[in-house]
DNA sequence: ACATCCATGTCGCTT
DNA sequence: AAGCGACGTGGATGT
């Protein structure tokens, strides 16, 4: 990885056009040739970048550019889309290279998967007398997170989200439409379960006869793991 | 901005839990206290990060950690969500600080807004005899991108996307449901217009009687700007 | 502050 | 390879 601090301007041409006026920035050249242009603020997203696979070439400025103070031109071209990034460097303030090696990568401990497992184990959170049929019940348009049976014997399809948004309600609605056309499992009612349900999502769900269920992740984890959360 | 190359392991606890095993990485500390952890590959997204507003504190390792080879602990806590990032540093290979100043920021030349403007100007792309009513036609649940009238005098609601996905069809469906309840403008037909329409989105749209229209951005721009695209 | 919608989204998984 | 959904989505914008 090469780190360059430089006064530069940047132009991007690809799906859109963008320009960065002259200022001091960090240029990060990764081992795969990709380039990130970072300022000293904002979020983790660079001001501008080129993703791999891409090729970096450097060139001398032409006379006009040199007259404007440009000392180097970096040109990064994406190998498939032909997106192009041009960095016009005026002054290099720092330049260092470092051998990092291959990263072993991130180990994630998911949330939605865990919630699904917990709700399957604690299926009576749907209401007394509910029984689990199965997780990831497959339909033609994708898997329903949880399928259960209520005390009356009707099927219950559960869509599970960390944050209950309008999209999740639409998704569950599509599943319910499809499943209610299948005489083997119809009638199917819907439950929209999430740690947090947005008001608009709740309104839409209830308007469509879908029940909303707010889940307390910590409490569910506490039931699951008796020694935790006793304080 | 401070740049540190270090052998380190990283733990994140917040909306999920995640762990990075010991390896050599770049730690970028921005002026606002935010921290990015980058490897020498992947895309512009860091392996791990903390967004501002957050606070970085450093500490000495405890005896166990010291015995495991840790020489410094960095602790970054988000000031609102209490999300936490812990960097256990084993060895520092590089450490430099740089004054970058405030960045003037990115100037973008947009896409969807431009597409909307072009389609409004070239409204007959919807079909001969169509007339524009207005862009951003306001409804109770949000603005319809373009409202037009077809030759028979019926209203046409256009949802515009760069990439036509199933979400866009759902969005247009909600608009159409609402607008068709308004006797002043009913009946309203729908057109789903995008540079590219995914097969599933097309199927869903056509199943609901929504017409799909694939837009050629370059051609539309060429009509708009006569001197371009003549080659 | 909240809700909505776009994104050069990126990422990971399935077909 | 292409499609599809989730994301610690982030970020802008209008209410």
Image (spheres, coloured by chain):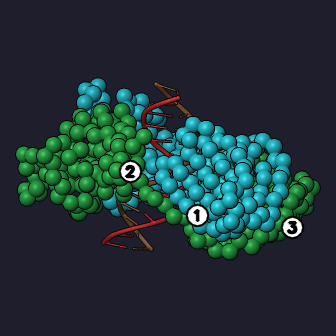
Chain colours: A cyan, B green, C brown, D red
Local packing at callout 1 (Cα closer than 10 Å; few below 14, some 14-19, many 20+) is: many
**Left or right: where does residue A72 sit relative to residue B206?**
right
Along the viewing direction, whichever of A171 and B200 lies nearer the viewer:
B200
Report the residue at 83% width, 51% height from top. A98
Q: In which quarter of the image is the N terminus of chain B?
A: bottom right
One can see residue A94 in this view: yes
Along the viewing direction, whichever of A214 and B28 lies nearer the viewer:
B28
Whole-angstrom CA distance, mark 2 to mark 3, is 65 Å
| Nearest to viewer (mark 2 / mark 3) | 2
Instruction: Give the residue number, with chain letter if any, for mark 2.
Output: B227
Chain identity of mark 1: A
Instruction: Give the residue number, with chain letter if any, for mark 1.
Output: A20
Along the viewing direction, whichever of A121 and B68 lies nearer the viewer:
B68
Asked where in the image residue A181 lies, by quadrant, the reply is: top left
**Left or right: where does residue B97 sit relative to residue A47?**
right
Label 2 in the same subunit as label 1: no
Q: Quadrant of the C terminus of chain B?
A: top left
């Amino acid at each position: 990885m090469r780190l360059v601090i430089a006064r530069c301007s940047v132009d991007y041409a690809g799906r859109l056009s963008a320009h960065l006026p002259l200022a001091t920035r960090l240029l990060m050249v990764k081992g795969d040739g990709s380039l990130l242009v970072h300022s000293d603020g904002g979020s983790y997203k660079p001001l501008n970048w080129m993703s791999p696979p891409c090729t970096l070439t450097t060139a001398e400025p032409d006379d006009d550019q040199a007259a404007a103070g440009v000392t180097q031109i970096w040109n990064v071209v994406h190998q498939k889309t032909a997106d192009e990034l041009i960095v016009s460097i005026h002054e290099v303030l720092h330049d260092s290279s470092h051998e990092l090696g291959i990263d072993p990568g991130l180990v994630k401990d998911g949330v939605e998967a865990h919630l699904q497992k917990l709700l399957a184990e604690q299926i009576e959170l749907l209401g007394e007398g509910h029984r689990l049929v199965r997780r990831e019940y497959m339909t033609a348009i994708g898997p329903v997170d949880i399928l259960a049976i209520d005390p009356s014997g009707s099927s219950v399809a559960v869509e599970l989200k960390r944050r209950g948004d309008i999209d999740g309600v639409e998704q569950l609605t599509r599943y319910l439409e499809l499943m209610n056309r299948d005489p083997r499992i119809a009638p199917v009612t819907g439950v929209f379960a999430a740690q947090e349900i947005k008001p608009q999502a709740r309104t839409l769900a209830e308007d469509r006869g879908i029940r909303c269920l707010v889940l307390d992740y910590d409490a569910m984890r506490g039931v699951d793991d008796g020694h935790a959360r006793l304080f």
